[in-house]
Image (cartoon, coloured by chain):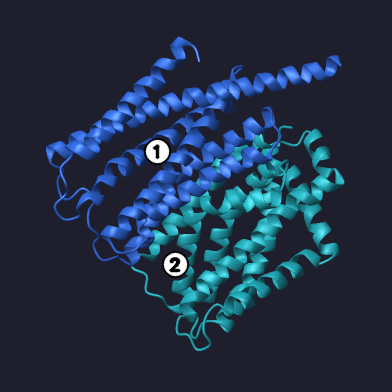
Amino acid sequence: MTERTRTLPLIALVGVTVALVLIFLYAPTEALQGNIQRIFYIHVPSAWIAYLAFIVVAVSSVLVLARRTDWRRWDRMASAAAELGVVFTTIVLTTGPIWGRRVWGVWWVWDARLTSTLVLWLIYVGYLVFRAMTPHGERRARLAAVIGVIGAVDIPVIHFAVIWWRTLHPLPTVLRPGGPQLPGSMLFTLMVSLVAFTILFVALLIIRMGIADAADRIEEIEAVGLERV
Amino acid sequence: MRRLGWLLWKDAITELRSFERLSTLVLFAVAVLLTLHFSLPPESTARPKAAAGFLWAALLFAALLEIRRSFESERKDGTLDGLRASPIDPVVLYAAKVASSLVILTVLAAALVPLTALFFSGRPAGLLPAVGVAVLGLLGLVAWGTLFAGVASGTRAGEIVLPVLLFPLVVPQTIACVRLLAYYLAGDKLSSVSTGFVLLGAFDVLSLGTSLLLFDYVLDE
């Protein structure tokens, strides 16, 4: 990597390290839940970054459909963001049950937020599966963009529907993750963690897009090379 | 409009020549209901409550087959290329596919609702509203299903990619439909029937609207 492209990943590394130090050494131990509550500082920012990633997918998908001459770049962005979105959603879906097992006593409940997150995960994994199984090119970019747009548009509807379904059979009240109000030190730790995750996301997005660009160029060279032979 | 009518007529003729498609779908749906029936213990009191879910599952799988077939039969015979090359507006082509699939599936629903009531529930409260609910649900499903059938048709293992893409997206449809079907089929208490219909209706509008806008992009080769 060049000097310039190393800056952001380095900042991300520093950010994540600082966040981890705060999470384990600075943030106070939660009174009721104990140390397992520290998973909150990973779980919540991951969820926010996952949503950010899927917004990026939606916007870049619209740009692909707009038939711009630089559609390739937006297609690479959509694909990279979807991958990162799936990674962070997976983090949410694994840290959640680990936490839940200790705090609620069960690995999984079908409450509104968990259900919606699982559906979200499935939608974007489906997006990646489609991309993996379709020949590269303009058609794949266009069709993936259709999926990306529809997925994004459907998310609020799914969320509402699941909440409505949930209200028909209310669960016993569940411990609120951060407690009724977050004390200052916890809020600070959460914010630092969120900023660190955001920088990490952007750094990874740029790196991933760079890899996709390089792969495309190799493919082009190979194609031309074959013709020459 | 006349072209839409012509396309529908084309599909109707193909179907009438052999009732094959409809009768196979009914048999398939019955086979699914039968299999699901065994998921519950023999004298389970959950049976009437589960009826709505089983019915929707059977309709969902049958719709999947129908939507896929609607694209594939034309692709196989090269009709799809012919249609693409013709001056027919992609929106009209899309509407024709949705309409013809929906007609078949409405007949299927009309057959399946009484069967489900027979197999599973004790006292069906409203068979006709249940068919209406099923059709409303199928409309949204077929709208996006047809769009995604187009998306998945150029893909390896397209028949798997279609449900993988479609099922999570139609979760609102599934939720609203099953709750309403449970109300009409088994007298399940439902605090807000109107919310269920609003959700179904809104979803259908969203599904049809986005599909009409985006089908253009799907059909380009």
Disc 1 marks which amino acid?
A: Tyr
Quadrant assignment, res A90: top left
For the N terminus of chain B, give its image quadrant: top right
With B128 as the anchor, is B5 left or right in this view?
right
Which residue is labeled 1 in the image?
A51
Disc 2 marks which amino acid?
A: Arg
Residue at the image position 63 percent from the left and 76 percent from the top: B35
Quadrant assignment, res A136: top right
Residue at the image position 30 percent from the left and 30 percent from the top: A17
Residue B143 visible to the viewer: no
Q: Residue furthest top?
A: A3
Placement of A162 over or under B33, stated as above or below: above
SS state under label 1: helix
User: What letter labels the chain drawn in blue?
Assistant: A
The alpha-carbon separation of the residues under discs 2 and 1 comes to: 29 Å
Question: Residue B209 appears at what percent x and percent y?
Answer: 54, 42
Question: Residue A110 appears at what percent x and percent y?
Answer: 38, 61
